Image (cartoon, rainbow, N blue to C red):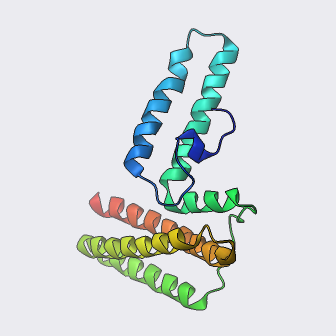
Amino acid sequence: MGNASHFALFDLEPDFRLDQDRLAVRYRELARRVHPDRFAGAPEREQRLALEEAARLNEAYQTLKSPSQRARYLLSLQGEELPPETTVQDPAFLMQQMELREELQELQDSADLDGVARFKRRLVQDQEQLNEGFATCWADPRRRDEAERLVRRMQFLDKLFAEVRQLEERLDD
């Protein structure tokens, strides 16, 4: 597998829009091939290499599976790495995030599982819009700032989705 890009590892062209089913199938094929258990009787060096390849494969799969991580990775392939934590300079977006968090807190306080489901559907729609926006601009160097701004927004949504999942788990118990 060497040091090929995550995309090359899965025989995919670098693009934001990916066939997730094809990615998953290819991942399973490669995972079977490099699984450390297959090298249990091999010399220590081969076992270590298999373990390293399996870890690299898992990292690549997790990166490409996640829209925000895939977006960050695509931008990093074009040059500068996007800093992991960058302040969003968009007051309207930040206000929207505060309102969403307040709404989520109200849903938690009222233990409204149906409301959480509606809230989550809205987040999915927001995520789809961000994904589409990024897909149309990431490859254009003149739109790099816009692409970076969209990635930061995707990261905010990722955190909000994690909070929603935690709330769902608490309310299901």
Q: Quadrant of the C terminus?
A: bottom left
Q: Is residue 134 something that shows in the picture?
A: yes
The percent coordinates of residue 37 (x first, y second) are 51, 19
Which quadrant of the figure has residue 104? bottom left
Q: Is residue 87 something that shows in the picture?
A: no
Along the line of sight, the residue nearer the viewer: 13 or 51: 13
Residue found at x 30% / y 64%: 171
Along the line of sight, the residue nearer the viewer: 17 or 61: 17
From this view, report whether residue 96 is shown above or below residue 20.
below
Residue found at x 68% / y 64%: 84
Along the line of sight, the residue nearer the viewer: 68 or 106: 68
Which residue is the extreme one toward the right? Answer: 80
Which quadrant of the figure has residue 141? bottom right
From this view, report whether residue 109 is shown above or below residue 135.
below
Residue found at x 61% / y 27%: 51
The percent coordinates of residue 107 (x first, y second) are 34, 77
Horizontal side of residue 79 vs 172, given as left or right: right
Q: Quadrant of the N terminus?
A: top right
Residue found at x 63% / y 57%: 73
Which quadrant of the figure has residue 53? top right
From this view, report whether residue 61 is shown above or below residue 52.
below
